[in-house]
Image (cartoon, grey):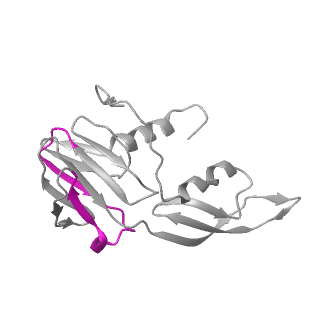
Amino acid sequence: MNCCTANGSQGLYYVWDSIVDDQDDLARINLLLNRRSPSVDVVSWLPYQGKVELRNKRTQRLTARIPNWVDKSTVKISLSDNGQMIRPVWIGNYLWLGKVAAGRTVQVSFPVVKTVETYLADSYEFRGTKYLGRYKYTITFRGNTVVHMNPLPKDGYATYARRQYRSDTAPQVTASEYVAAQRIDW
């Protein structure tokens, strides 16, 4: 992104908008992130807990994409009003939930995996005429979320100061039931 174009904000909007994809009577959940939409609300506890609620408002069928790091055999699905367990049906990485009546809430749960990975990155730094080479970073993830980096980068430290994401308890905030009246089509 250049300094004065809006491509970055457009990209963020498209990601947010694509969390829920409505097609006729089917709502496809593409990312397990919090999102209110006309057809279904997604309430996520990630990365703190592997718990997501899909609150159906009006769609007839639901499907949800489960991240690659989730072991499919550990996924549990239930209807939150009566606790009835639902047997998972998979289409690739999508969990097919089939027909879900309006007003029902489906709860999907799974363990959050913690991994530690090592990456090399060019520094693009010079001391005089000497190129400083590559840096080795050890990165700790909870699911897809970076929760720690060692060493912490000199620039952008605040981006990786994420002690709060290491907790097993998701913070709770009260939010309005606002749903955008229309989609932006750039």
Residue at the farthest right position: 128
Position above or below: 56 against 78: above
> Residue farthest to the front?
82
Q: Is residue 111 above or below residue 155?
A: below
Q: Is residue 51 left or right of residue 166?
A: left
Q: In front: 127, or 24?
A: 24
Q: Residue 144 placed where, x, y %?
A: 46, 61
- 39 over 69 or under it: above or below: above
Residue 178, compared with residue 40, is above or below; it is above
Viewer-proximal residue among 42 and 182: 42
| Residue 45 belongs to the span the image colors magenta | no
Examine the image and state in which quarter residue 129 appears: bottom right
Whether residue 134 sits left or right of residue 182 in the image: it is right
Q: Residue at x 31, y 45 (%)?
A: 42
Q: Count the marks: how many? A: 0
Residue 8: image x %, image y %?
Answer: 50, 39
Give the residue drawn at x 38%, y 48%: 33
Please state, as top left, top right, bottom left or bottom right, where the C terminus lies in the image: top left
Task: Locate residue 48, reporting x and y percent.
Answer: 46, 57
8 relative position to 88: left or right = right
- Residue 3 drawn at (x, y percent): 61, 35
Residue range in magenta is: 56-80
